[in-house]
C-alpha cells in the first residue's frame, strides 16, 4: 500500500505538533512519533 500525505495535511500535523509542544516539553515530539508510527502500521 502506498500512502501519500498531502502538503495541507503536513501543515495540520505540524500545527498539532506545535500545539502539543506548548502543552509540555517533548509532547509535540511524542505526538508526531505516534502519528507516524500509526501511519507506518497502515503500510504493513
Image (cartoon, rainbow, N blue to C red):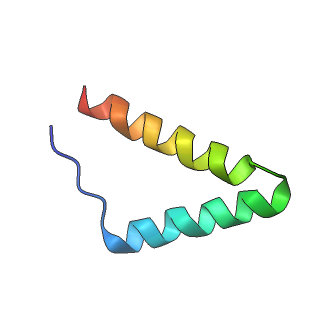
Vertical comparison of 16 with 40: above or below: below
Residue 40 falls in image quadrant: top left
Query: Is residue 8 or residue 36 the one in the foreground?
Result: 36
Residue 37: give x, y in percent of width and height: 45, 35
Number of disc labels: 0
Q: Quadrant of residue 43?
A: top left
**Residue 1 locus on image (x, y percent):** 15, 37
Question: Residue 19 occupies which quadrant of the picture?
Answer: bottom right
Task: Work out whether residue 21 or residue 38 is closer to the camera in this orientation and state it.
Answer: 21
Provide residue 18's location: percent of width, then percent of height.
Answer: 68, 66
Query: Left or right of 2: which side holds 20?
Result: right
| Quarter in which the C terminus is drawn | top left
Identify the residue at image location x=50%, y=44%: 35
Pick the residue in front: 14 or 42.
14
In the rendered image, residue 29, in percent from the top left (x then y), is placed at 64, 49
Q: Which residue, as the protein is rendered here, is positioned at the far top?
A: 44
Residue sitting at x 54%, y 42%: 33
Horizontal arrangement in the rendering, residue 22 relative to residue 4 (left or right): right
The answer to whether 27 appears left or right of 14 in the picture is right
Left or right: where does residue 5 sit relative to residue 10? Answer: left
Q: Is residue 17 above or below residue 8?
A: above
Amino acid at each position: 500500500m502506498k500512502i501519500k500525505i498531502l502538503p495541507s495535511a503536513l501543515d495540520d500535523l505540524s500545527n498539532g505538533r506545535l500545539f502539543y509542544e506548548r502543552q509540555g516539553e517533548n509532547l509535540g515530539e511524542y505526538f508526531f512519533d505516534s502519528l507516524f508510527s500509526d501511519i507506518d502500521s497502515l503500510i504493513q
